[in-house]
Amino acid sequence: MPALKLIVGLGNPGLKYQGTRHNIGFELVDRLAQGARPTRFASKFDGQLAEIEIDYRRVLLLKPQTFMNLSGRSAAQAIRFHKIDLADVLVVCDDLSLPVGKLRLRPGGSDGGQKGLRDLTAHLGTDQFPRLRIGIGENGEIDSADYVLSRFRATERAAIDDALILATQAAAVWVVQGIDAAMNRFNGPTTAKTP
């Protein structure tokens, strides 16, 4: 029987943050939840939790409600309660250093300044867990904290929508075939049209 998988989308709770660059992880998890058989989220593990099926495999979806910089507490609770191996956890987050819409999958590694990943690493005691980063573009002259809480420009939105379609496919490949197969297919030189 395939192991239970967990996909953690990082973001900030509340209407104020919907559609912001920092909430791209929530957007992806919401898209997965609205798949073939739409599912509802319930409050659990200091987050919003849902369960879906991808190719006959059970997959939990988690949106921590603790705000981005404290995401680790929620994810660690779910991981420990369900005794999920870290190789079976995929964390989805935004990345300032990637062009808008570019995907980057990794089996582990540094947080690259992403504070949600940093908090997860602190709570799990390791940075060896798969992650899917979605590029939100560089902030240029704008303060990073302000930039990640801004919304995508109309010219960027098409690239982000394309990226989210690819990211749902990447998550499905990860669930069924693992991180190496997902990296091979989705870490190409260009994965989405940029504006």
Image (cartoon, grey):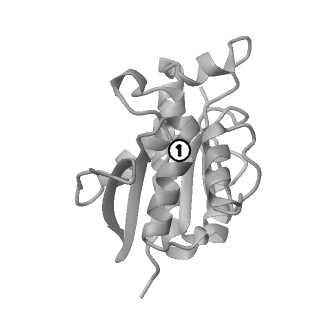
Residue 6 in sight from this viewpoint:
yes
Measured from the top left, where is residue 88 in percent x and y? 54, 70
Residue lying farthest bottom? 1
Q: Is residue 173 left or right of residue 125?
A: left
Quadrant for the N terminus, please.
Answer: bottom left
Residue type indicated by callout 1:
Ser
Q: Residue at x 61, y 31 (%)?
A: 136
Residue tagged by mark 1?
71
Horizontal placement of 122 versus 70: left or right? right
Q: Nearer the viewer, residue 154 or 79?
A: 79
Is residue 172 visible to us here? no
Q: In the rendered view, would you say 100 is above or below 112?
A: above
The residue positioned 52% from the left and 20% from the top of the image is 155
> Quick one: SS at disc 1?
helix
Q: What x and y, as percent, mark residue 109?
A: 76, 55
158 over 143 or under it: above or below:
below
In terms of image quadrants, where is residue 184? bottom right
Q: In x, y percent, where is residue 127?
A: 71, 57
Q: Quadrant of residue 82?
A: bottom left
In percent of width and height, residue 183 lies at 66, 62
Based on the displayed image, in which of its 4 quarters is residue 142 positioned?
top right
